[in-house]
Image (tube, helix red, strand yellow):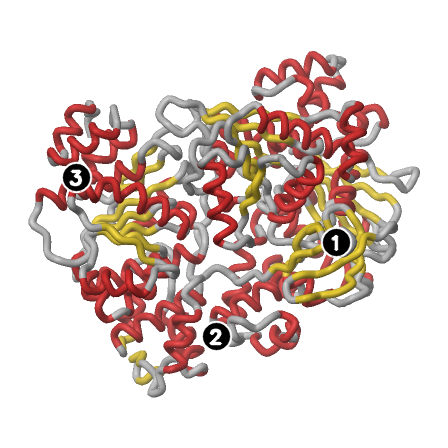
Amino acid sequence: MSLLDEESVLNMLAKPIVRAFKERFKHLTEPQIQAIPRILEGKNLLLMAPTGTGKTEAAILPIFSKLIVEEQSPGIKLLYITPLRALNRDLLERIDWWSQRLDIKTAVRHGDTSQRERRIQSLEPPDMLITTPETLQVILTGRILRNHLRSVRWIIVDEVHELATDKRGAQLAVALERLRLITGRDFQRIGLSATIGKPELIARFLVGNYGECEIVKVPVVRNMMIDVIYPVPDEDDFILAENIGVHPEVAARLRKIRELIDSHRSTLIFTNTRPLAEILTNRFRVWDEQMKIGIHHGSLSKIKRISTEHGLKHGKLAGIICTSSLELGIDVGRIDLCIQYNSPREVTRLIQRVGRSGHGIGRTAKGVVVVTNSDDALEAIVIARRARMEELETPEIPMKSYDVAMHQIAGILIEYGRMRLEELLEIFRRTYNFKDLSLDELQRIVGHMADLRVADLREGIVLKPRNTRELYNYYFNNLSMIPEERQYLVVDESKNEPVGILDEEFVAEYGEPGTRFILMGKAWEIHDIAGEKIYVAPLESYEGAIPSWVGEEIPVPYEVAMEVGRLRREYRDRRTKGESMESIAKDLAKRYGVNREVIMRAFKEVEDHLEMGIPIPTDVEAVLEEFGDYVVLHVHGGLKANRTIQKIIAHFLAKRSEAPVKGHQDPYRVVFKSKHISGNLIMEVIRDLLKGDYKEKLIEAIESSTLFKRRLVHVARKMDVIRSDASLSEININQLAETLKGTVVYEETLNYTMFHDFELERSRELLEKLINGEIKLLKWTSPTDEPSPLAKLTIERFRFEGEVSTV
């Protein structure tokens, strides 16, 4: 399409739209200039642009223009789908302004919509309905609203990248094909997305296997400033640390964050986990009860979240400590600064988070990453560089999810009562997610449903069961594909203060009075469990305390880990040739756009290794280190590849030594602990693993893992094998796994765990390179039973943060 000017694009729109637009805005934005003509032409479109550049108006204004100009039949014409209810609230406020001026009826529908509002929508359907993927599942089966859907001509999917990369996206993809059956024709599909790698994958997800889709991509980083800071404690920080009960390094970071909050009008402080958000908020409040800071994450009540959002929006709060719950476009007013505590782990995540600041055309988005150690620092420096260059991760889309397929079949049976297997297969295969689903796989899913009496299968026809109660209960109790993760608040009994959160998996296994565990760097003993609160007392000693875990780590990609390795290699080589630390730091600081002191601190351990004559792991060299009962394999594989290496080696080491082997990993190291292992034994195990069927051996290792069994419970809930409200303490997980072996439930769990948590091919490739010498293997044994400075980063992280691998 030729480049159009603003005036030409405005002239394409109906006059009432142009009048209303000029009342509110001075100019069209670049996304609007590029998207509006394409949407008016009826093209499917994926619009990728930064937050705050008018993506919503780019999508709705051309559609509103057509609604005004063209004759319309009654019913819902435009479905606007968002991943969060909170986005629906904000969107309705924003769109109400347009609908009042243009006499277009808009409404929102989700789980919180009142009965009165639902009745109004049934009697007088809006022109535009804003909803979530889950509520769409209800609407598709509702007798009256379903009729109103016959008029749908446009679908807008907001934050489409967020949906595409999990099972909610697969659910939506099939739901849109079900909607196509209702309308009897194709409708125009428009996806609004943050900047991501490989946009053509998201476009394919949006339109399915038979549609065409244009992509409009507006560069994201030209108005983005990202800094990385690595605070050093001073005398004041030692005093502060004493007062609020943290290490001086933590006090230095808190002080720096507070300085940044105080020097900006409104700030978001992102953490990678909920417990870290809780603990930071808690420490700030211990420091100063009057500090105008709020907290926002998915485990908090809706009332508390909305109150926090309004607090920042109306100036009652100066900052919010939050998780990914505020990554998407929830309206919290104008944000001046985004702080990321710890490396953000992924480039797309950093861009998304920093993009929350500086809303408005021409304003600069400002982000500061506060790092905690040298791994964190190098990782953040690399991610910031990749963000500026828009070197983004490829999105991973889950394929052939059996639990999603089962739920969609149930919905289709409620809609139509019966359908031939071949027709069902055609619906699924129209979507990108199920393009490779086979007839045999579909039959097995339907067979599972028949065993549970939620469907019947007769002569190639799938039917509603005679007693439909089970079918309806199953469908409406499983509208959400998000696993129900229960969490328990841990409270220090002596102070009645929250100290963190434990997942139900940990509580199911260890949650009884007397259990000693490590959480947020401290040892605790459980005294009492009351409902969803666990009352604990602090312990002086770590003796006998087991590490806890909470939620899932954001995986650092292989490419980021390898660039960290390249930086370590470059620094080592230049130092070995006699170049000074200052000279290297000055050069790297300029290339990576960070402060020289950050670079100097980030290479402290590499400098220590050079001084002590310890080999340095890089992108092309691995180090096998032994000390005490530990063996550490230093390999820059990224989190998922290293997790895979850890799991498969630990499993077969334990089999060979007939003794348990503890293991954990981060993106740069894999750690094994046992009295019965050695570096040589590990290399023997690696050689044996590569001789046979590596995939088969990995599956065996995964099946024995806690992580697999946790996922099995989630899938079993979604596939109606166990009650959706059944708590883990009621379930014998090992017995469940044994019972489900060979079923579609077990197969789905294995497929999803392999897809989501492990990297089969990359891990095999890394191990092969280790054996054939493409990655040079260096060995080092500690003369003192103490770890090397680099290994210490991993050992201390797991010891003091209290996080262990759950696999």
Q: Which residue is mark 1?
A: 492
Mark toward the start of the polypeptide (3 vs 1) = 3
Mark toward the start of the polypeptide (3 vs 2) = 3
- Asked if residue 5 is positioned above or below residue 144 in the image, the reply reads above
Left or right, residue 156 beside residue 313: left
- Asked if residue 413 is positioned above or below residue 304 in the image, the reply reads below
Q: Which residue is mark 2?
A: 720
Left or right, residue 799 beside residue 12: right
Residue 674 coordinates in the image, percent (x, y): 83, 55
Residue contact at pointers 3 and 2, CB within 8 angstroms: no
| Residue at the limit of the structure toward the bottom, as seen here | 466
Q: Which residue is mark 3?
A: 40
Q: Nearer the viewer, mark 3 or mark 1?
A: 1
| Residue at the limit of the structure toward the right, as seen here | 784
- Asked if residue 566 is positioned above or below residue 38 in the image, the reply reads above
Left or right, residue 475 beside residue 273: left
